[in-house]
Image (cartoon, helix red, strand yellow):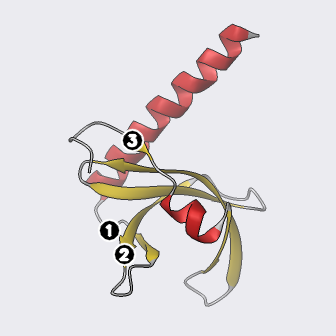
Amino acid sequence: MSETGTLKFVDYLSKQYGSALEMTDEQGQSRFFDLLAEFEFSGHCYAIVQDQEGQYEPEALRMVKDDAGTWQLETIDSDEEWENVMEAYDEVAYSEELDLDEEQ
């Protein structure tokens, strides 16, 4: 895993599921999400997903392996952890957008 505060992009979920994920929401409805990014940060793996309809802002989820070694997603319960993950991702995503704008 990466050091605390360092974000390292990975491709564990995309290798297993591809870039589109089907998940069940709290009401039991099946919804499709785009996998925007997956990375290691502060000793854990995380995924940034966004619903394919674009109705909601991107969401951070923690990636965990089940007993069979399959990657699963779970909600981040700690507000502090969620904010740290999103802040780290936003810094990288925003800096990449700036780099692309400067090249054009």
- Eyeballing the image, is 90 above or below 63? above
Classify mark 1: helix, strand or loop: loop
Asked if residue 87 can be seen in this view, the reply is no
91 sits to left or right of 56: left
Residue located beneath label 1 in the image: 77
Q: How many marks?
A: 3
Residue type at the position of mark 1 = Asp
Task: Look at discs 1 and 3 and give the one toward the viewer.
Answer: 3
The percent position of residue 41, horizontal first and vertical second, equals 32, 47
Q: Rounded to the nearest whole Å, what is the CA distance between mark 1 and mark 3? A: 22 Å
The answer to whether residue 24 is above or below residue 91 is below
Proximity of marks 1 and 3: CB atoms separated by less than 8 Å: no
Query: Which element type, helix, strand or loop, lies under badge 3?
Result: strand
- Left or right of 72 in this view: 42: left
Residue located beneath label 3 in the image: 8
Q: Farthest residue in the left direction?
A: 4
How far apart marks 2 and 1 lie (CA) works out to 17 Å
For the residues labelled 3 and 2, the Cα–Cα distance comes to 18 Å
Q: Nearer the viewer, residue 100 or 86?
A: 100
Residue at 21% across, 41% down:
3
The residue singled out by tag 2 in the image is 65
> Foreground mark, 2 or 1?
2
Quick one: 63 or 77, which is closer to the camera?
A: 63
Q: Position of residue 88 (x, y in %)?
A: 39, 38
Determine crowd level at label 2: few under 14, some 14-19, many 20+ residues with C-alpha closer than 10 A: few
